[in-house]
Amino acid sequence: MVKKDRNLNVISISGIGFTIFFLLVSLLSPVIIEETAESLLLDYRFQLRNVVRPPSVPEDIIIVEIDDRTLEKYGSWPLNRSVQAKLVKKILSGRPKVLAVDIFYAERQNRQADEELARALNKSPGRVVLATGFDMEAGGREEAPEYLWDDAIMKIKHQSDIVNVTEVNKLKVSAPGLYSHALIGHVYSPPGLDGKLRWEHLFIKYLNDYYPSLSIVTAARSIGKGTGDIIIYGGRGVAVGGIFIPTDPSGRMRINYLGREGIFIHRSAADVLKKDFDASVFSGRIVLLGTTAISTYDFAVTPFSARMPGVEKNATVIENILHRRFIEDVPVSVTCFLILVTGLFLSFALPKMKAIPGISLALVVVILFTIVNQYLFTYHGRYMNFIYPFATIFFISIFSTTYKYVTEERRARELRKMFSSYVSPKIVEELINNPGMAGLGGRKKEITIIFSDIMGFTSFSEKREPEEVVAMLNDYFREMADIIFRWDGTLDKFVGDEIMAFWGAPIDQPDHAERAVRCALNMSDRLDDLQKRWQAEGKPVLDCGIGINTGIVLIGNIGAAGKKMDYTAIGDHVNLGARVEALTRQYDSRILITEHTYRKVSDLIERHSLGHAEIIEGEEVRVKGKRTAVKLFRLKALPHKTKQ
């Protein structure tokens, strides 16, 4: 019991250790885990959500794409800006709410083409948003051009408690003329460690100023708000026109991708440039102009796709903002609470369970957590960290199962080694499944004991060769041991020509007295068969006496630790059983049972349920070493065989 308690304590303490460890990891949120394993699990949640609840197709956003068909018709990339100017004019003629141009004009082409594009972009003041670039390259930090700080162009009016914001080192600005009357937003979108783009930087820091993204500026303008209406609440979110966008402390918004590329309405620039194209399709809608041609290399890896055009990513962010389709993080405190509760629960529950039920319990907890997690994500847009609670459950379960497997296997080997010569394989397996039943440390228990001894063995052995004596003994013992095991008895020992066996230990056997009596009758029958065979073989015929007693004894693994240990029973009732066996010669009966055993089987005898047993009226005798007389009963076998 002490060893078992120690094993339970090892598992519980280890479980608590795993719980504390993953609590700390959850609070620290290592980037390497968040950006890899946890992000991968989040991807699966996206995909499962779209199976369970496919999103509707956004109809208020149209993407005009400069695709491969456009480049085939109008020339390779970069597309001539005169063509782009015509494209912008055509789109603006349809009177869209906003035109967001997701193209960074990093280099000049020629003066005439640049001026044409500038005039087209500046034709609708306040309705055009252009992209500007930033990156993390090292280098001198140049002051931002003055035109970027025109109130009509790019300026966040208010910042509040801004912390951990992403800071860039280099500003990429194109020709000032293009920005004369347009709003500007950055398109800085670095992927995660696994190469997937999951976050939108709603604003970034350059020098001491904050610059909003193309997506949030476009969304703000579509509801009649400018960059001056964007308010940053550091570490919590960004507000614009009554819409609060939840962010992480760095000002990043989780992008709630709606599916693979192509979910938005697309129009090829080649079609838009046709004379018969009806530009009214853009009326009242947000239009994004961007590239999807393979040669432009403007693609992102997302939870759904390995090649989503960057313009479609921006369209997704705009859609998320305007439709308030956000992914909000469940507070870390909730995740920590779940880790604590599940960790402590499993730490104390698993040690008390067998391996398979324990694993099943852990699996049920994981399944329930997965269902709740997916439900919150699918129907409420709530993101709950999965990896840390799962890791807590996984490591506690694996450690518990492995530790128990190793210790239980070792215990099973010990029990097999210890009991395989005492009891039947069936009993050994029961002990392995319920090791506490063995009671190796010693316990008092009521059992029924059989002693069997060969009559006249001494004179027999003196007149025979040793080989003949050993052969007949082995023949006899083998047959008797087989019967004892058949009745699920414990074969305690062979002492010379004597056999000691008992029932009721190491496993509980409420019918131990009945089993012992039936076994004795069966042994008597088998001896009759042996006598006939020995007689036919011309060998001497041996007989035996069997004494049976029932009572409370001390039972356990007794001996010299590390030298010789035996699982045996000791006590007055054991001694009484041995003395009763010796009286079988005096009463000319092969089987004698005490009144203690008789009381256990009397109802069976009265109903003749023992099959072929007959009780001859008992006599009170004084057994050597006992002060009080003990009533004995002679058990007589009738001619037919014992029922087995």
Image (cartoon, rainbow, N blue to C red):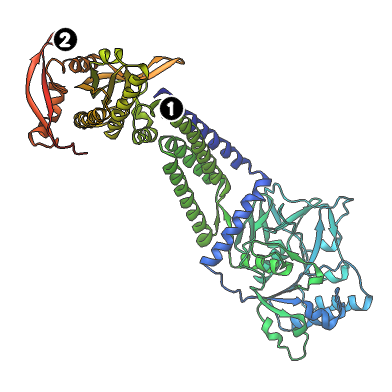
What amino acid does circle 1 point to?
A: Lys
Which quadrant would the C terminus be assigned to in this image?
Answer: top left
Looking at the rendered structure, the secondary structure element under dot 1 is helix
Nearer-N-terminus badge (1/2): 1
- Report the residue marked by disc 1: 417
Density class for disc 1 (Cα within 10 Å; few <14, some 14-19, many ≥20) is: few
Q: Count every numbered label the image shows and give the total.
A: 2
| Residue at image point 43% right, 24% down | 3
Residue 250 in percent (x, y) is at 69, 50
The residue sitting at 39% across, 33% down in the picture is 432
Picture quadrant where residue 353 is located:
top left
The answer to whether 232 is drawn above or below residue 633 in the figure is below
Residue 175 sits in which quadrant?
A: bottom right
Q: Which residue is mark 2?
A: 626
In depth, the one of 559 and 535 nearer the eye is 535
At label 2, which amino acid type do we have?
Lys
Q: Nearer the viewer, residue 294 or 27?
A: 294
Q: Is residue 361 above or below residue 263?
A: above
Percent of width and height locating residue 331: 55, 48
For image coordinates 67% across by 84% down, the residue present is: 281
Q: Is 166 rendered above or below residue 636? A: below
Q: For the residues marked 1 and 2, what is the alpha-carbon distance in whole angstroms?
A: 37 Å
**Rendered image: mark on residue 634:** none
Residue 85 is at least partly visible in this image:
no
Q: Residue furthest left?
A: 617
- Res. 314 in view: yes
Q: Is residue 347 above or below residue 473?
A: below
The N terminus appears in which quarter of the rendering?
top left
